[in-house]
Image: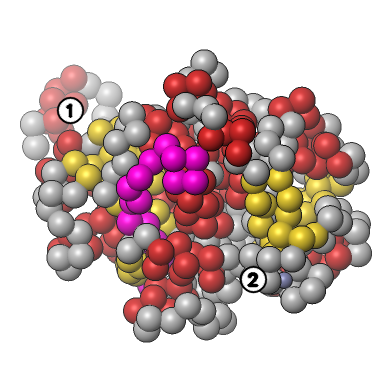
Amino acid sequence: MTEHKVICWDCGSETEDPYVYTCPKCGGLLMVKMDLEPVKEMRPEDLRKEKLGVWRYAPFMPVDPLHKVSIQEGGTPLYKTDGLAWEVGVSEVHVKFDGLNPTGSFKDRGMTVGVSRAKELGAKIVGCASTGNTSASLAAYAAKADIKCAVFLPSGKVAAGKLAQALFYGAKVLSIDGNFDEALDLARKMADERRLYLLNSINPYRPEGQKSVLFEIIDQLDYEVPDRIILPVGNAGNISAVHKAIQELQEVGWIDKVPMLTGIQAEGASPISKAFSAGKDDFIPEEDPETIATAIRIGNPVSGRKALRAIYDTGGFSATVTDDEIIDAQRLLGKREGVCVEPASAASIAGLIKLVSMGVIDRDERVVCICTGNGLKDPDTIIKNSPPPIPCGNSVEEVERILSR
Ligand SMILES: *Cc1c(COP(=O)(O)O)cnc(C)c1O
Ligand SMILES: [Zn+2]
């Protein structure tokens, strides 16, 4: 672990109370500020003694590994997807498949650090509001840590696999009469009254674990920094964490080039893309976000301003994709690469396709798409958008007839 403090992202003042989630002075977003002086003495190879995963990067994490609550998160594959690159017409494309985390999404990266922190603090109850994956992940880590867990889900808007997970790991699953933004308001109220330790991405410790996806990508590419990283953006915690990781690698002198961070949103839930198109550094919240990609169906992104800074600072881009483009990209990745991602994750692939056709992405770029979650989370969407099973009798002849069609 490395020494750190919690400061305000807006005004810089330090907070010591671990149960506040916004700056007591200005109401701004909190962030962890690491003291990276000891890491400057190290080389990337020094970390490679630990196996690939979140805790390989413990010197960049603000929690003592002594309190570690881990189910072996991170260490996910980085596929070189030549078939996809050929389809899209770009020289090199990699897919970082974070759907292969223990609960099937990148949320486990943040949760291992967040729940370790809760344990360090001796928290009695942890909780979060969620579009699904955060609650699935928190429920699992709370189970592992033996801490009581409450998850706040918007009623009827959560993919089946994710709901099943939260129930399965033994959390108190609360179905809230409202959308995600309203469920978050309620969870925040509970946290303000100190009734639970809140593990949404406003918790400054969770994004620290999420930095590890960037550390792994750079590590897996042997520190040959890619030109661009594309990822879906909902609450914008992930893109902000990836940006912070880039800044920290620069600070310790391990990289000298910065990938262009490119955030993709669904057309029906796109406050950040709209702000980017208008050249603004703040966004206008949207009332009724709607998209098939439930994990990014968010109208009022908690870390929206951080995301815009991440995009501007790295010379990146933001665009929207339609639900049809998302489904096409999801199927292309399955058919061409054997990778099954959930709709929100396919937004990064849909964004790649769109930005190449718009001329924003050069054909000779080296691109990494982060695919954030596993397709099996949301089988209903896959079944609805695939040709149905073919009725077949029980004879070799009939099978032959169908296969030869
Ligand atoms: C949470 C989530 C996102 C959105 O990440 P943010 O940090 O909210 O921007 C995208 N895809 C999947 C699969 C997710 O679970
Ligand atoms: Zn402040």
Position of 218 with respect to 37 (left or right) is left
> Is residue 253 highlighted in magenta?
yes
Task: Say which residue appears at 64% left-offset and 71% top-offset.
Answer: 10
Q: Which residues are magenta?
A: 250-268
Residue 346 position, x and y percent, is 36, 52
Does residue 31 lie above or below 166 as drawn?
below
> Is residue 74 highlighted in magenta?
no
Query: Which quadrant of the view contains residue 128?
Result: bottom right
Q: Mark 2 highlights which residue?
A: 10
The furthest residue to the top? 49
Q: Amino acid at mark 1?
A: Glu
Q: Is mark 1 within 8 Å of ligand 1?
A: no
Does residue 202 lie above or below 106 as drawn?
below
Number of residues whose C-alpha sits closer than 10 Å to that of mark 1, classed few (under 14), some (14–19) or many (20 or more):
few
Helix, strand or loop at label 1? It is helix
Q: Is residue 380 visible?
A: no
Number of residues whose C-alpha sits closer than 10 Å to that of mark 2, classed few (under 14), some (14–19) or many (20 or more):
some
Task: Say which residue appears at 64% left-offset and 27% top-offset.
Answer: 71
Q: Which mark is residue 21?
A: none
Q: Quadrant of the C terminus?
A: top left
Position of 159 with respect to 256 (left or right) is right
Q: Mark 1 highlights which residue?
A: 398
